[in-house]
Image (spheres, coloured by chain):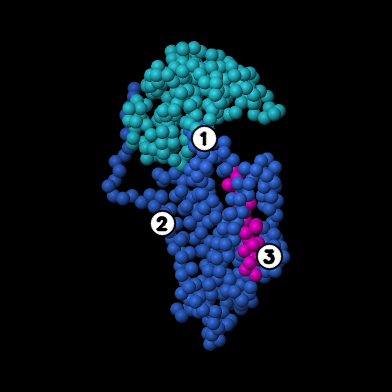
Chain colours: A blue, B cyan
Amino acid sequence: MTEAVETTSRASSRLRINKRMLTLAATGIGAAGIACVVAGAIVFGDFGIATDFSARLAPPSWAHWFGTDQFGHDMFARTVHGLNVSLWVGLIAATLSAFIALGLSIFATTCGQWADRLVSFLVDATMGLPHLVLLILISFALGGGTHAVIVAVAVTHWPRLTRVLRAEILQLRNADFIIVSRQLGKSWWYVGRHHFLPHLMPQMLVGLVLLFPHAILHEAGLTFIGFGLEPTKPAIGVLLADSMRYLTAGKWWLGLYPGVSLLLLVLCFDAIGNGLRLLLDPRQAQL
Amino acid sequence: MLTAHRVSFRHGPRAPYILREVDLSIRPGEIVGLSGPSGRGKSTLGRLLAGHLGPTSGSVTVDERANQYRFNPVQYLHQSPIFATDPRWRISRIVAEGWTPDDVTRNELGVKESWYDRYPHEISGGELQRVALLRALAPGLRYLIADEITSMLDPVAQVEIWQVLLKRARLGLGILAISHDQALLERIATRVVTI
């Protein structure tokens, strides 16, 4: 006996909030958070750099949301400045890293077996070393400062993305739809532009965005232990290192707020990265 | 005439031969059935004929000429069309990569225009096989390698697709039908080759 099963239920006329919209919203909030940091740093300008000894080590209040430090700097303004510095260091380092990854993965997949072995070895070697040790070493060798941190972060963060891109290119190169495209008379240029690029771009973009949190956290960590940015720069690492002396004296706001702000910034990037990954994948289109 | 002349194939210099000195030719309008146990290299031979693989030795020619880099007059249809279509492309674009089909051909194959804005994984395997066939049936097509193309379809769809292909064969399309289905091959093929 056969029985009919209704497969399409009546769609309600009301607009339903689906997962895709939620993802889009999360991505938007993440982007807005980052935009606020950049805008905040511009609006604050020199505010937070100038000293005001009349309000030293003041706890959080309406006048100073995040309190003030030992020089009477407004900690909110300093945190925003610090996040902004982290943002730019992270942006430059992560972009450099992503391009190193793209270059190496194309090199590995197009220049024969020896190139592939070489790149695989480099990836394994870099991943095998403890991240922070390598960072300290490079930053120290280059004499510290912003440039050294950017270089150190850039040359240590490419392996993961290189692996992903290399695997993606290898898989695409042998994919049936690529071979079919060639047999349909399309040039390698066309195949590269219309088949390879749409598959690689999302990986590249998501990889880049997800590199940010790593870059920012490593920059802050490196600065915190004294091998990173100059102590005069209001970087988050510098703020946290400075707060150490006062934390034991009960000045908790000096460490808590910059730390939590850094965490929130990282979460913003994570929201954007994961959002992009879901939104750019046609298989997730109906979520 | 599509000819494989003493074609051998193996995956590497030390790998075992999958095919050794195979001769096969298909005339225009002929439907050659290719059958044989699994793992004998039926699909490999099909891919060699369509240029998906290059022979280790021997040659594949169409009218005694090697294939130029344009639209290959020999097209290969996969058993699983999902691999032969870009997962990030919509159906309209997938079809247009081969040619811009007229409505008659499209309706003949039962490809609906409502599928055109969907992605490959959003239509069924049978529907996608029709799309892949439509893409291959471009004006320049002279030989079709049909590798188990209807084995995953329901009987009605199977009949529909083969009716279209039989009509094409009468108009001069040469077909190599690779299948385990003896009954199917006996019904459609002008001759059956076993490897």
- Residue A285 versus residue B12 in the image, above or below: below
Q: Are marks 1 and 3 on the same chain?
A: yes
Residue B84 x %, y %: 49, 33
The magenta stretch spans which residues? Answer: A145-167
Give the CA distance from mark 2 to mark 1: 40 Å
Which residue, as the protein is rendered here, is positioned at the far bottom?
A54
**What residue is rendered at 34% in x and 31% in y?**
B102
Q: Amino acid at mark 3?
A: Ser
What residue sits right under mark 3 in the picture? A139
Residue A36 x %, y %: 46, 67
Tell which of A85 and B137 is nearer to you: B137
Q: Are marks 2 and 1 on the same chain?
A: yes
- Going by the image, does A179 lie left or right of B97? right
Tell me if residue B57 is in the magenta stretch.
no
Q: Amino acid at mark 2?
A: Ala
Which residue, as the protein is rendered here, is positioned at the far left?
A13
Residue B52 x %, y %: 55, 30
- N-terminal of the two: label 2 or label 3? 2
Give the CA distance from mark 1 to mark 3: 47 Å
- N-terminal of the two: label 1 or label 3? 3
Which of pointers 1 and 3 indicates the residue nearer the eye? 1
Residue A163 x %, y %: 61, 47
What residue sits right under mark 2 in the picture? A25
Tell me if residue A159 is in the magenta stretch.
yes
Tell which of A39 and A237 is nearer to you: A39
What residue sits right under mark 1 in the picture? A182
